[in-house]
Amino acid sequence: MKIIMLGAPGAGKGTQAIMIAEKYGIPHVSTGDIFRANIKNGTELGKEAKKYMDQGLLVPDELTVRILLDRVGQEDCRNGYVLDGFPRTIPQAEVLDQELGKLGDAIDVAIDVDVPDESIIKRMSGRRACLSCGATYHVEHVPPKKEGICDHCGQPLVLREDDKPETVRNRLKVYHDQTQPLIDYYDAKGILKVVDGTQEMNQVFEAIMKILEK
Ligand code: AP5
Ligand code: MG
């Protein structure tokens, strides 16, 4: 199964993608996590991506597409994957469709996790992220078992650089300008499903399961 998670920054794409990936035993592929891992390790890719990410801007399509295609071409992605944060522009979606098409393959479903902007700003300031395994928490809604430590891998949790309120507002603007058009793109293909992302985390997951188990 090949699944795309759509939604504004902070809508809960990553939270749900991890749960879906665990349930079906398929990889969770997040371009944001790949970039953050590269920044942490000081690679050339990380240095390039950081220039854009710190301002809340998108990393250029050419670079992002290359990274993503390389990742989904790996052995563990053969039986499917959950894409989280990719595609983010129409050109990215088109390249993905073309590349899958060459293999006689296609995306099965695009799930839009719908959350209004006002709720997003509130969520982001409370988010804590694990830069090692990509898990996310929220100081109030989704606290880790031990404060400041990742439940999954035991590494310290951090407040992401791009979660400052002014950067979040910029990310939301970029989302509305460049990423929201993908909702119509996948709707036109007949594979769009929308879930209400303002519900409690497990309810959102239940709604997604209803879609996937049909
Ligand atoms: P990326 O890492 O993808 O960030 P994003 O889209 O801005 O999304 P987030 O990770 O911030 O939010 P999320 O939807 O995953 O929410 P989460 O589950 O954490 O990208 C970062 C940057 O990298 C981009 O700005 C760009 O520069 C670059 N980039 C990445 N991909 C790119 C691409 N394809 N092209 C170009 N550039 C790219 O949840 C948020 C918070 O809410 C958490 O604290 C969580 O615990 C909490 N929460 C989750 N669900 C609920 C709930 N139901 N109720 C209450 N709280 C909840
Ligand atoms: Mg995320």
Image: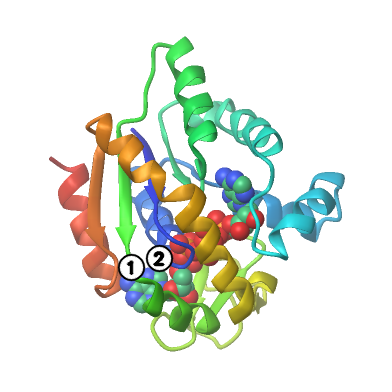
Q: Residue at x 56, y 26 (%)?
A: 75
Hey, which quadrant is residue 45 in on the image? top right
Report if the beta carbon of the residue with label 2 is closer than 8 angstroms to ligand 1. Answer: yes
Q: Determine whether the residue tagged by mark 2 lies in a helix, strand or loop.
A: loop
Q: Residue at x 71, y 36 (%)?
A: 63
Q: What is the crowding at mark 2: few (fewer than 14 residues within 10 Å), some, or many (at least 20)?
A: many
Residue on which the image places disc 1: 115
Are discs 1 and 2 less than 8 Å apart at CB? yes
Look at label 1 and name its amino acid: Val
Return the x and y of residue 21 as percentages of the image width and height: 40, 48
Q: What is the crowding at mark 1: few (fewer than 14 residues within 10 Å), some, or many (at least 20)?
A: some
Hey, which quadrant is residue 212 in on the image? top left
Quadrant of the drawing holding the C terminus: top left
First in residue order: circle 1 vs circle 2: 2
Q: Nearer the viewer, residue 39 or 185?
A: 185
Residue on which the image places disc 2: 11
